[in-house]
Amino acid sequence: MQLYSWNVNGVRAVEKKGFVPWLVETGADVLCLQETKALESDLSESVRSPDGYRSVWHSAKRRGYSGVATYFRNGLEPLRVEGLGVRKFDDEGRCQVLEFESFVLVNAYFPNSQPLRARLPYKLEFCRAMVKLGRELREAGKPMVLCGDFNIAHREIDLARPKDNEDNPGFYPEERRAMERLLRWGFVDTFRHFTPEPGHYTWWSYRTNARVRNIGWRLDYHVVDEALLPRLGESRIHPEVPGSDHCPVSITLD
């Protein structure tokens, strides 16, 4: 099973850049999108139901803001699809929880902590909610696959210029510690499980030609319960895919 995740920074914008043909070409079994910035009713039929896929949407109450969506191949329908069940997060379209037969997929768009730590408490509360959900699912015998835009560069290796960003959103010590707490509870950063080397990023500023120069941040993850490690085949970043300031990431589960 191939699981993809991508912050598209506006699904209507990425539609104009070949999103639907790209999805069909990948052969992805499941694709999670973040920052969709749209209501399902605003979208074309080709975006809602590409050939061979169904989709479910969780939009923010505020138009043009946040939002997540998940595509799955026909015949791979989840047993249930829910929000997180926390109003302040669900109102912003931050999360979808999709139960499959042997695991639960969580599609999450973590909040940006913003300059001067303006939304850091909200961000840290969301991080704690992810840990809580993962632990509850484990106790229920349903290991979690958590994917999405975490808006956190976990370690210095995860951004090109750590010294220049020591007190910037996405690299605040508090949010990096929150990421560390998640991993200490028995969850695994799948990309780092396979790839310890530097120079791999998933987001690049539109300014200063950063993507071409590979001056980026790794903000997008697949994190899995360690119980799923024997089924993990690979974890990849796809910087060659244009269309957003983020690129897709993927894992394979046997």
Image: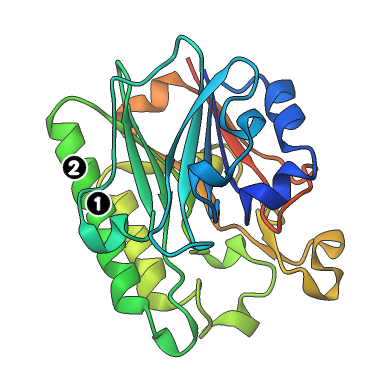
Crowding at label 2, few (<14), some or many (≥20) Cα neighbours within 10 Å? many
Crowding at label 1, few (<14), some or many (≥20) Cα neighbours within 10 Å? some
Q: CA distance from mark 2 to mark 1?
A: 6 Å
Instruction: Pick whichever, 81 or 190, lies toward us.
Output: 81
Relative vertical location of residue 145 with respect to residue 125 in this rendering, above or below: above
Residue tagged by mark 1?
131
Relative vertical location of residue 228 with respect to residue 121 in this rendering, above or below: above
Instruction: Pick whichever, 233 or 45, lies toward us.
Output: 45
Q: Horizontal and vertical percent for residue 247?
A: 68, 48
SS type, badge 1: helix
Q: Which amino acid, mark 2?
A: Arg
Residue found at x 23% / y 55%: 129
> Residues at badges 2 and 1 in contact (C-beta under 8 Å)?
yes
Q: Horizontal and vertical percent for residue 110?
A: 42, 59
Left or right, residue 96 beside residue 165: left
Extreme residue toward the front, this view: 41
Residue found at x 71% / y 54%: 244
Q: Horizontal and vertical percent for residue 177?
A: 35, 68
Q: Horizontal and vertical percent for residue 106?
A: 36, 39
Residue found at x 79% / y 47%: 242
SS type, badge 2: helix
Type of colouring: rainbow
Q: Say the numbered circle drawn on residue 111.
A: none
Left or right, residue 208 beside residue 59: right
Residue tagged by mark 2?
135
Instruction: Pick whichever, 126 or 62, lies toward us.
Output: 62
Extreme residue toward the bottom, this view: 116
Extreme residue toward the top, this view: 75
Q: Which amino acid, mark 1?
A: Val
